[in-house]
Image (cartoon, grey):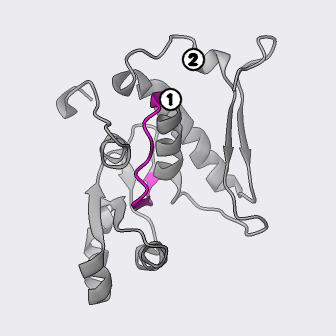
């Protein structure tokens, strides 16, 4: 939304979120701000200084904390900036660093089962969680496509419809 020129741009984060999830939201925004031009070359230079961003994590009174939603929040922000929608058949989980690494998370099996229960067909997850697949039930392994990632740029390309960076991985 348009920001107030008299005040610095704001990141507003709402929902029942703990400190770690709020920090993940800030890290996601910082990464997107620093790398958006590779995915949206026509983005104006002042986009992030003239817009406030409101990130809401729904589910009412259910408290949420932890870094696992980092790549999801970064993807939502990059979707907003580039106007590329997120694929509706895809769920994702992973911690994001300021340098764009995707770090492993806990509970991948449970998160994947929950996604499958909602009709999701693809799960983007940290490559360092790939060994967890051994403990998954066969039905989960058979019915879900897993996209294993090391970098958040790979998440954007896998999750956002029609998204490709304007640079090659070696330039990142």
At 49% from the left and 51% from the top, the residue drawn is 72
* Quadrant of the frame with the C terminus: top left
| Residue 104 vs residue 46, the one in the foreground | 46
Is residue 154 magenta-colored?
Answer: no
SS of the residue at dot 1?
helix
Label 1, label 2: how far apart the Cα atoms are: 9 Å
Q: Is residue 14 left or right of residue 167?
A: right
Q: Secondary structure at mark 2?
A: helix
Q: Main secondary structure of the magenta part?
A: loop
The quarter of the picture where the N terminus appears is top right
Residue appearing at x 34%, y 64% in the figure: 122
Q: Which residues are magenta?
A: 81-95
Q: Looking at the image, which is closer to me, 82 or 38?
A: 82
Residue 102, percent from left and from top: 38, 51
For image coordinates 63% across by 54% down, the residue present is 21
Q: Residue at x 54, y 47 (%)?
A: 73
**Which residue matches tag 2?**
47
Q: Are the two marked residues, 1 and 2, in contact with CB atoms closer than 8 angstroms?
A: yes
Q: Is residue 89 left or right of residue 60?
A: left
> In this picture, is 56 found above or below 66?
above
Query: Foreground: 147 or 35?
Result: 147
Q: In the rendering, at what x and y percent does residue 93 appear?
A: 45, 60
Q: Is residue 109 left or right of residue 170?
A: right
Mark with earlier residue (1, 2) = 2
């Amino acid at each position: 939304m348009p920001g107030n020129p008299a005040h610095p741009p704001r990141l507003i984060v709402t929902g029942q979120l703990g400190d770690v999830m709020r920090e993940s939201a800030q890290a996601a925004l910082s990464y997107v701000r620093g790398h958006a031009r590779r995915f949206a070359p026509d983005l104006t230079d002042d986009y992030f200084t003239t817009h406030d961003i409101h990130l809401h994590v729904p589910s009412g009174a259910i408290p949420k904390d932890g870094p696992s939603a980092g790549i999801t929040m970064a993807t939502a922000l990059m979707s907003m900036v580039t106007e590329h929608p997120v694929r509706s058949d895809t769920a994702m989980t992973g911690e994001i660093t300021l340098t764009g690494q995707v770090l492993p998370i806990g509970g991948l099996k449970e998160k994947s089962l929950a996604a499958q229960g909602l009709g999701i067909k693809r799960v983007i997850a940290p490559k360092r969680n790939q060994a967890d697949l051994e403990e998954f039930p066969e039905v989960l392994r058979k019915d879900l496509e897993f996209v294993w990632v090391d970098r958040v740029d790979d998440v954007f390309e896998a999750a956002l419809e029609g998204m490709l960076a304007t640079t090659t991985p070696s330039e990142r």
